[in-house]
């Protein structure tokens, strides 16, 4: 081998591995296959050559690499160890369509590795879950790569727990930076989850600006658990009325929305064309007036809403708004099929 190139380098190990395979020495391959089948790979203290064997086995498997889960290969939540394994398995990540890294202690180095995978040409990665990781300023790396034409990511999940949200502020400003990536015409994200990420009405302004620049790809947006309030919802609704916006699913549970926010949503539902099919407003104190304002949009023939979530919204069974919703659901002129209300489902 070349002077200075050690057997322990990942590239050398994989090349060695191909040689061993060609020579008919399958012992290392078989050893790793047993590790994978038995589940003993999780937390195993493997050498660099053995990790290269893992990569080889996974990449040469007849099974399509639909989903990669780091928690199948690591036992604990040691950041350094987890990121070391992530680096070793990066060739597998680059070939996977879905990468699940929820609560894996992803660091700056991990984000840099993921950015490398997203820039691959061709890029296979379509779904990336980074929920429950304290990314901090590492989102800058993701923001940059989302604007790369080789990036074909469609689903990005960044859910934060309540505790992490408090520890990692200003999450809203970092989120706004990531949102600005949508302004790139190359960005094709269709599902974006920002639950409990500290997004405020200012973050909604950044999101609205990005969606106006490139509104056609996003199909599902979850902002549940953020203090958007009516002002934030109004800013989003202004984009929903854009004929180029194709958003179909909007989740706004526990976003401090009241009746004025409902009025803005009603206006968006009346827009032509209206693409919104599912709307979640559970956990907002809409009250009687909010539900009635929402019904004004649901009654419009341009409204295409099919499913509506209204659990724990401060509405009583006796309220006339509930009767309005039931009547709308039963009217064949409208698309509303299911209402999730309190503990009951009106079908």
Image (cartoon, helix red, strand yellow):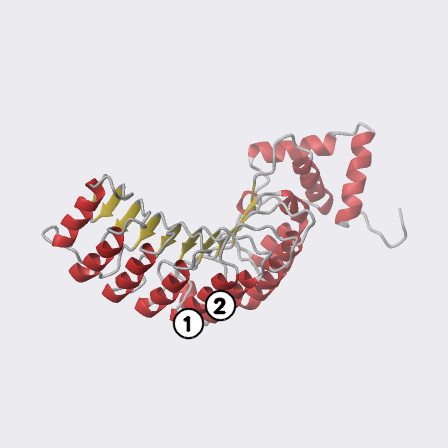
Q: Nearer the viewer, residue 274 or 122?
A: 274
Q: Where is residue 256 shown, x and y percent of the image?
A: 29, 65
Q: Which quadrant of the figure has residue 283?
A: bottom left
Mark 2: few/some/many CA within 10 Å (<14, 14-19, 20+): many
Task: Confirm or deny contact between disc 2 and disc 1 (CB under 8 A).
Answer: yes
Q: In the rendered image, which residue does mark 2 sit on?
A: 176
**Residue 257, labelled with which disc?**
none
Q: In the rendered image, which residue does mark 1 sit on?
A: 202
Visible in this render: residue 227?
A: no
Q: Residue at x 77, y 50 (%)?
A: 9
Q: Nearer the viewer, residue 93 or 154?
A: 154
Q: Where is residue 339 shown, x and y percent of the image?
A: 24, 45
**Between discs 2 and 1, the one toward the N terminus:** 2
Q: Nearer the viewer, residue 48 or 233?
A: 233
Q: Is residue 31 above or below residue 183?
A: above
Q: Residue at x 9, y 52 (%)?
A: 318
Mark 1: few/some/many CA within 10 Å (<14, 14-19, 20+): some
Residue 106 is left or right of residue 123, and the answer is: left
Q: Where is residue 198 shown, x and y percent of the image?
A: 40, 66
């Amino acid at each position: 081998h070349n002077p200075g190139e050690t057997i322990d380098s990942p590239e050398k190990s994989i090349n060695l591995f191909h040689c061993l395979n060609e020579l008919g020495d399958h012992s290392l391959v078989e050893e790793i296959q047993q590790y994978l089948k038995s589940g003993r790979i999780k937390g195993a203290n493997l050498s660099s050559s053995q990790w290269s064997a893992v990569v080889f086995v996974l990449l040469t498997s007849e099974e399509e690499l639909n989903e990669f889960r780091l928690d199948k290969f690591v036992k604990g939540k040691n950041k350094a160890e987890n990121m070391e394994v992530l680096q070793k398995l990066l060739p597998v990540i680059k070939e996977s369509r879905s990468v699940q890294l929820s609560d894996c202690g992803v660091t700056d180095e991990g984000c840099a590795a993921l950015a490398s995978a997203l820039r691959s040409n061709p890029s296979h990665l379509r779904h990336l879950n980074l929920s429950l990781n304290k990314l901090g300023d590492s989102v800058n790396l993701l923001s940059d790569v989302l604007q790369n034409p080789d990036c074909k990511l469609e689903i990005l999940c960044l859910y934060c727990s309540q505790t992490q949200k408090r520890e990692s502020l200003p999450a809203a400003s970092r989120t706004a930076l990531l949102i600005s990536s949508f302004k790139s015409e190359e960005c094709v994200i269709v599902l974006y989850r920002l639950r409990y990420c500290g997004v405020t009405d200012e973050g909604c302004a950044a999101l609205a600006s990005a969606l106006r620049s490139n509104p056609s790809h996003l199909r599902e947006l979850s902002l549940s658990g953020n203090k958007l309030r009516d002002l934030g919802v109004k800013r989003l609704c202004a984009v929903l009325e854009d004929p180029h916006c194709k958003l179909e699913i909007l989740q706004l549970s526990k976003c401090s929305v009241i009746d004025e926010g409902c009025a803005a949503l009603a206006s968006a539902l009346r827009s032509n064309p209206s693409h919104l099919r599912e709307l979640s407003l559970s956990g907002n104190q809409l009250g009687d007036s909010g539900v009635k304002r929402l019904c004004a949009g649901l009654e419009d023939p341009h409204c295409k809403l099919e499913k509506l979530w209204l659990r724990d919204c401060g509405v009583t069974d006796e309220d006339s708004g509930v009767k309005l919703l039931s009547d709308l659901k039963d009217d064949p002129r409208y698309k509303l099929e299911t209402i999730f209300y309190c503990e009951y489902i009106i079908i």
